[in-house]
Amino acid sequence: MSDEKYYEMLWNCESCGAMGLLAKSQKHCPQCGSAQNPEKRFFPEEGQEVEVQGHQFVGADWHCPYCQSPNGAAASFCGACGGAKDGSKEVKAVTDPAAKTPEPPAPPAAPVASGGFPWFKIILVLLVLVAGFFIVRFLWKSDEPLKVVALNWSREVDIERFAAVEESKWCNELPAGANVVHRAMEEKGKKKVPDGETCKDIRIDKRDGTFTKKRECTPKYKETPEMAYKCRYRVNSWKVVRTDKAQSTQGAEPAWPAPRLYAAGGNIIGNERLASRREVLSVQLQPAKGEVLTCALKPEVWSRLKVGDVVTAKVRASGGADCDELKKR
Ligand SMILES: [Zn+2]
Ligand SMILES: [Zn+2]
């Protein structure tokens, strides 16, 4: 036998108005003798439950087909009229209203515009017109002949120096050789930690005038700051100290700048080295009418062009060419 606890469901007598009768122990009204209506059984208020000591659950009650009295599942004949159990129906279950989550009140219905001036349609038409304007102006492209008026290039080289720099990082992420000068606790972020659980009792109608409780719990969490040590440290490392730049002078071939390094070599304080380099190649194009356009080009496209060449490219109504679709004629 399980150690499950059983509690009395309640019912009200519909004939004489007696309230809060016990559904398990009182199958008939003690005042007027009317049979209990098991469809109208209900759960007691929280804290008012009456436990049925030593209750042995055998099954749902059955309706006497002759006098409608509810009878325990174990009985073969109606306790009120002696009618046989044959052909009887089991009583229906009642759901605990407390177990349902209350629905939020429905928001007030938006007033439905009807028969009024069709503002909405006018706004929609305006939106379509504005969208159309932008599509034509910024997306519409036409193939246009463009004359190459200048070919420009610029090249840059970064120069790094090995030197002591002061930086700050989480203390467990320090680079090799870091010399910590200061450490302090700081909030690194938030983390969720278990914080007990929320529980509620679900009450289940056993359909024999009793109910049981099932405890349902879900874990709860709370956010707490996650603290960690932040370190300020000095470390010797390579850092960009300056950038040398070379630019096109009309017609000159692209060339990388040749920076002078004060002391070249390995990881020794004061030494310098060349670091990343960048190149920008561009062309200036003169359309039949309008302003000169500038296109950044890939080296293989750029190198095939000469000043005076005519190319075609898709040009937007708003100005600006589609540089990826530039073609030499
Ligand atoms: Zn009664
Ligand atoms: Zn009966």
Image (tube, rainbow, N blue to C red):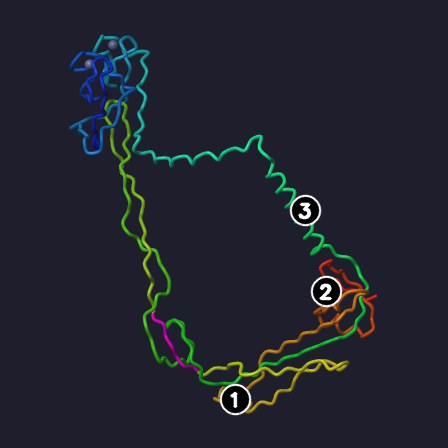
Image quarter for ligand 1 equals top left
Residue 218 in magenta?
A: no
Residue 234 in magenta?
A: yes
Q: CA distance from mark 3 to mark 2?
A: 29 Å
Mark positioned earlier in the residue sequence (2 or 1): 1
Looking at numbered disc 1 in the image, what kind of residue is underneath it?
Asn
Mark positioned earlier in the residue sequence (3 or 2): 3
| x and y percentages locating residue 176 in the rendered image | 42, 78
Q: Main secondary structure of the magenta part?
A: strand
Q: Residue at x 37, y 62 (%)?
A: 189
**Image depth: mark 2 or mark 1 in front:** 2
Mark 2: few, some, or many residues within 10 Å (few <14, many ≥20)? some
| x and y percentages locating residue 158 in the rendered image | 58, 81
The mark found on residue 129 in the picture is 3
Looking at numbered disc 2 in the image, what kind of residue is underneath it?
Cys
Secondary structure category for the residue under label 3: helix
**Image depth: mark 3 or mark 1 in front:** 3
Q: Mark 2 and mark 3 in contact (Cβ < 8 Å)?
A: no
Q: CA distance from mark 2 to mark 1?
A: 42 Å
Q: Which corner quadrant holds the N terminus?
A: top left
Q: Which residues are magenta?
A: 229-235
Q: CA distance from mark 3 to mark 1?
A: 63 Å
Mark positioned earlier in the residue sequence (3 or 1): 3
Q: Mark 1 and mark 3 in contact (Cβ < 8 Å)?
A: no
Q: Which residue is mark 1?
A: 271
Secondary structure category for the residue under label 1: loop
The answer to which of 84 and 150 lies nearer the viewer is: 150
The answer to which of 207 and 58 lies nearer the viewer is: 207
